[in-house]
Amino acid sequence: MPLYTYICKNCGEKFDLLIGVTAEKTELKCKKCKSKNIEKTYAAFSMGKSSSFSSNNCPTGTCPLG
C-alpha cells in the first residue's frame, strides 16, 4: 500500500496516510483538525546503501550507487 504525505490547508498540519487498494476506502482528512481541505505533497525518500556496492567496485571510484 502506498504511503502519501498530505498537508492540511486549514491548520498546516503535515501527516502521512497509508492508502489501500482494497474495497475499504481511507477517509482523506486532517488528523489534527479533521478538515477535508488537504493537499498531497511530495515527500523526500531515501534508499538504503547496499554493502555489495562500494567505491572498490567502480573503476573510477566515484560510483553513484556507492
Image (cartoon, helix red, strand yellow):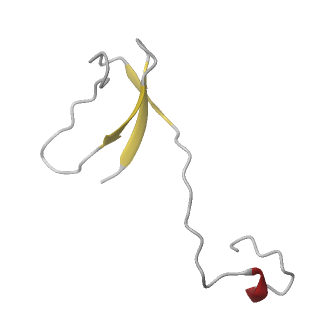
Compared with residue 19, is residue 10 higher up or lower down, i.e. above or below?
Answer: above
Q: Is residue 33 left or right of residue 45?
A: left
Residue at the spot 40% in from the left edge and 42% down from the top edge:
4
Res 40 → quadrant: top left
Q: Farthest left residue? A: 23
Q: Could you tell me residue 20's position as x and y percent? A: 24, 48
Residue at the spot 56% in from the left edge and 63% down from the top edge:
47
Res 25 → quadrant: top left
Residue at the spot 26% in from the left edge and 18% down from the top edge:
34
Q: Is residue 55 left or right of residue 3?
A: right
Q: How many marks?
A: 0
* Between 20 and 31, the one nearer to me in the picture: 31
Q: Farthest right residue? A: 60
Q: Could you tell me residue 64's position as x and y percent? A: 74, 70
User: In the rendered image, which quarter contains the N terminus?
Assistant: bottom left
Q: Could you tell me residue 19's position as x and y percent? A: 28, 44
Q: Is residue 52 left or right of residue 12?
A: right
